[in-house]
Image (cartoon, rainbow, N blue to C red):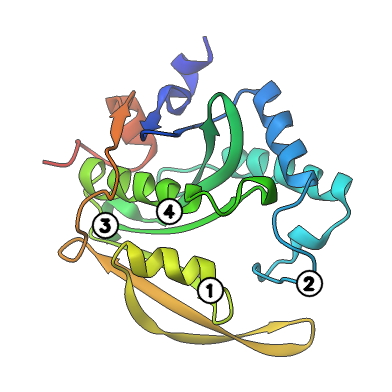
């Protein structure tokens, strides 16, 4: 069975409305279809890599390749976990968490997207709250970081709601012009706990080893 070779397939992070987990190949096709139908309104530019503006077929293929690339390059020292959020059995978006040298740094970074047809329902906040619970309560993270363009008001609102604090800015280049990216940081001491009930199942010792963690958080 695949779980014997890749135990992260058994990881489940559950909230009242969502289940976050790795998708099967058939479910991944559904995630690609979701992306093809749109991930942001026309004219918006929420991502530094503007994959959301690709033609639908290319957008779907980007999602597939990103998923496979992350799994193929996985190392305990450097990993990116892209959990698909399912609502009533259907994918609504992707919540990722990434780390380098997590065993030493205890820091995770995150990013996410919600299908355009599912936006405005609070799924983005619920997905991130679930991810933060996994990071802090289960993996023993010391801090979580995120970043958003200054005009990405919905993403910044989610960060504020969950307790992130400003962590400076960076100046990036998008389409030949400078854009301001606001960095945000949430320390373990300022994490208020999940804003919704969260349960985690399947976080076995083999999973922890893949994430560079020796033992569950106390």
Sequence-wise, which precedes: disc 1 or disc 3?
3
Residue lying at the far left in this picture: please name it: 218
* Crowding near the residue tagged with mark 3, few <14, some 14–19, many ≥20 C-alpha atoms within 10 Å: few
Sequence-wise, which precedes: disc 4 or disc 2?
2
Rendered location of residue 149, percent (x, y): 57, 77
Q: Secondary structure at mark 2?
A: loop
Label placed on residue 125: 4
Residue contact at pointers 1 and 3, CB within 8 angstroms: no
Could you tell whether 63 is left or right of 203 in the image?
A: right
- From where the camera sits, is residue 166 visible? yes
> What residue is shown at x 52% (from left), y 42% (from top)?
74
The residue to which callout 2 is attached is: 43
User: Taking 117 as reference, is 172 above or below it?
Assistant: below
> Which residue is nearer to you in this view: 27 or 6?
27
Label placed on residue 153: 1
> What residue is shown at x 57% (from left), y 73% (from top)?
152
> What residue is shown at x 47% (from left), y 43% (from top)?
75
Rendered location of residue 10, percent (x, y): 42, 22
User: Taking 80 as reference, is 18 above or below it?
Assistant: above
The residues bearing labels 4 and 3 have C-alpha atoms spaced at a distance of 28 Å
* Crowding near the residue tagged with mark 4, few <14, some 14–19, many ≥20 C-alpha atoms within 10 Å: some
The residues bearing labels 4 and 1 have C-alpha atoms spaced at a distance of 13 Å
Rendered location of residue 40, percent (x, y): 70, 60
Sequence-wise, which precedes: disc 4 or disc 3?
3
The residues bearing labels 2 and 3 have C-alpha atoms spaced at a distance of 41 Å
Mark in front: 2 vs 3: 2
> Which residue is nearer to you in this view: 24 or 56?
56
The residue to which callout 3 is attached is: 104
The residues bearing labels 2 and 1 have C-alpha atoms spaced at a distance of 15 Å
Residue contact at pointers 4 and 2, CB within 8 angstroms: no
> Which residue is nearer to you in this view: 201 or 215?
201
Q: Secondary structure at mark 3?
A: helix
């Amino acid at each position: 069975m695949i779980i014997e070779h890749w135990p992260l397939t058994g990881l489940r992070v559950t909230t009242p409305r969502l289940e976050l987990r790795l998708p099967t190949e058939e479910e991944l096709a559904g995630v690609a279809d979701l992306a093809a139908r749109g991930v942001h309104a026309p004219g918006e530019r929420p991502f530094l890599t503007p994959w959301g503006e690709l033609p639908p077929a290319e957008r779907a293929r980007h999602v597939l390749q990103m998923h496979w690339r992350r799994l193929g390059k996985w190392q305990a020292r450097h990993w990116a976990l892209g959990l698909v959020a399912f609502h009533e059995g259907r994918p609504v978006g992707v919540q990722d968490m990434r780390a380098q040298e997590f065993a030493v740094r205890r820091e995770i970074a995150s990013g996410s997207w919600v299908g355009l047809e599912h936006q405005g329902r609070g799924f983005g906040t619920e997905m991130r709250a679930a991810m933060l619970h996994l990071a802090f309560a289960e993996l023993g993270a010391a801090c979580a970081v995120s970043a958003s363009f200054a005009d990405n008001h919905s993403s910044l609102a989610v960060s504020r709601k969950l307790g992130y604090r400003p962590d400076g800015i960076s100046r990036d280049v998008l389409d030949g012009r400078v854009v301001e990216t606001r960095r945000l940081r949430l320390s373990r001491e300022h994490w208020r706990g999940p804003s919704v009930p969260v349960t985690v199942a399947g976080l076995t010792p083999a999973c922890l080893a893949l994430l560079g963690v020796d033992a569950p958080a106390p």
